[in-house]
């Protein structure tokens, strides 16, 4: 019989024990999140339906919430403040059917969603958060970056919702590629001086966040991909593959304003990938010129009229304000 001190624990045994602990903890967290969501929904129903009888009585409602919070907040904590109770009431009003809130999102996600007044916009973020398993922080970032509005700059509302609902697969780059792209997560100051390689390095360092900004279906392939044309070497900044569009997506990064020479260089890379890397059953390669600024007229007249594979997208190193997004959306709609 072995001495007890000589017994060695196998890696598999330790791994199994760890998996049991982690799985149980995750289930417990999800259960707590679900019960909290359901509790806030029931509170909202109680306040709005049973106390207010479903009527719009702003003065009485404010009085009711202040007095209710004064009683229960000292006993149960800040999770039952006037502000939280107001959110509970809005939660029920936005999702009056209990089955709609049973297991989809946690309370942080619902708090973000109920602040969206536009039903179509709210549905878009519901669908994307659900299908892409966004965390609350990821959902918050996408809302704050104006993802929905940026897609509307180059797509109609119906097509944006159809793609989000998974009713159809995107058919062209404009349905996925945003313009502008918001890269605030890189942590680069707007007034700082940096090289293209610095921007590229920051994207790779923050690859998960960059993939979130790129959107559905993207996977990373290569950085500084070497292309040899006879005796000349060229290097493609970033190469991705999109499984929805079923094609390579090439990124060239320029920290200056776009020029027609930049477009020509990107076109060469796209041609190379189409002729050397693309499989017969895959779609044509897409080239994205990510630039600090662009002249739409230069883009228009540099590329063929029926171009569908080359796109210029301006990047921003800061989150846009709601006013900026609405102004840009209005401008695009006027030009349409």
Image: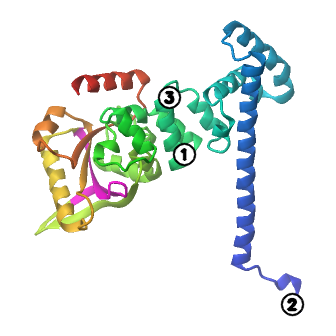
- Say which of marks 1 and 2 sits in front: 1
* SS for dot 1: helix
Q: Is residue 179 left or right of residue 18?
A: left
**What residue sits right under mark 2 in the picture?**
2
* Magenta stretch encompasses residue 251: yes
Q: Which residue is mark 1?
A: 130
Above or below: residue 17 compared with residue 236: below
Spot occupied by residue 145 in the image (x, y as percentages of width and height): 44, 34
SS state under label 2: loop
The residue shown at (57%, 45%) is 135
Q: Which residue is mark 3?
A: 119
Magenta includes 53? Answer: no
Q: How many marks?
A: 3
**Residue at the spot 73% in from the left edge and 80% down from the top edge:** 10
**Numbered mark located on residue 226 in the image:** none
Nearest the viewer among 63 and 223 is 63
Question: Percent position (x, y) of residue 157?
Answer: 37, 33
Secondary structure predominantly adopted by residues drawn in magenta: strand
Q: Is residue 316 something one can see in this rendering?
A: no
Residues at marks 2 and 3, CA–CA distance in whole angstroms: 68 Å
- Magenta stretch: give its range: 235-256
Would residue 267 be seen by someone viewing this image from the given angle? yes
- Quarter occupied by the N terminus: bottom right
Badge 2 or badge 3: first in the primary sequence: 2
Q: Secondary structure at mark 3?
A: helix
Q: Residues within 10 Å of mark 2 (few under 14, many from 20)?
A: few
The reply to whether callout 1 and callout 3 are in contact (CB within 8 Å) is no
């Amino acid at each position: 019989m072995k001495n007890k001190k000589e017994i060695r624990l196998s890696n598999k045994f330790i791994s199994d024990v760890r998996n049991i602990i982690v799985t149980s903890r995750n289930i417990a967290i999800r259960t707590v999140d679900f019960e909290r969501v359901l509790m806030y929904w029931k509170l909202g129903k109680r306040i709005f339906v049973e106390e207010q009888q479903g009527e719009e009585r702003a003065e009485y409602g404010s009085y009711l919430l202040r007095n209710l919070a004064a009683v229960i907040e000292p006993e149960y904590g800040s999770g039952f403040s006037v502000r939280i109770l107001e959110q509970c009431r809005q939660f029920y009003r936005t999702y009056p059917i209990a089955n709609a809130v049973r297991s989809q999102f946690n309370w942080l996600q619902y708090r973000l969603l109920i602040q969206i007044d536009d039903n179509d916009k709210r549905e878009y973020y519901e669908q994307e958060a659900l299908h892409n398993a966004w965390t609350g922080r990821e959902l918050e970032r996408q809302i704050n970056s104006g993802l929905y509005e940026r897609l509307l700059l180059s797509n109609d509302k119906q097509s944006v919702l159809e793609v989000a609902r998974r009713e159809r697969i995107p058919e062209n780059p404009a349905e996925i590629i945003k313009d502008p792209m918001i890269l605030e997560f890189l942590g680069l100051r707007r007034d700082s001086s940096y090289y293209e390689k610095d921007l590229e390095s920051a994207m790779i360092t923050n690859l998960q966040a960059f993939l979130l900004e790129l959107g559905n279906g993207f996977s990373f392939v290569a950085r500084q991909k070497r292309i040899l044309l006879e005796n000349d070497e060229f290097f493609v900044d970033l190469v991705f593959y999109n499984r929805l569009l079923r094609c390579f997506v090439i990124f060239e990064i320029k920290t200056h304003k776009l020029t027609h020479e930049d477009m020509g260089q990107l076109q060469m890379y796209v041609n190379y990938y189409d002729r050397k890397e693309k499989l017969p059953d895959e779609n044509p390669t897409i080239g994205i010129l990510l630039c600090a600024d662009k002249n739409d007229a230069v883009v228009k007249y540099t590329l063929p009229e029926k171009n569908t594979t080359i796109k210029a997208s301006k990047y921003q190193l800061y989150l846009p304000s709601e006013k900026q997004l609405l102004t840009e959306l209005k401008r695009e709609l006027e030009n349409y």
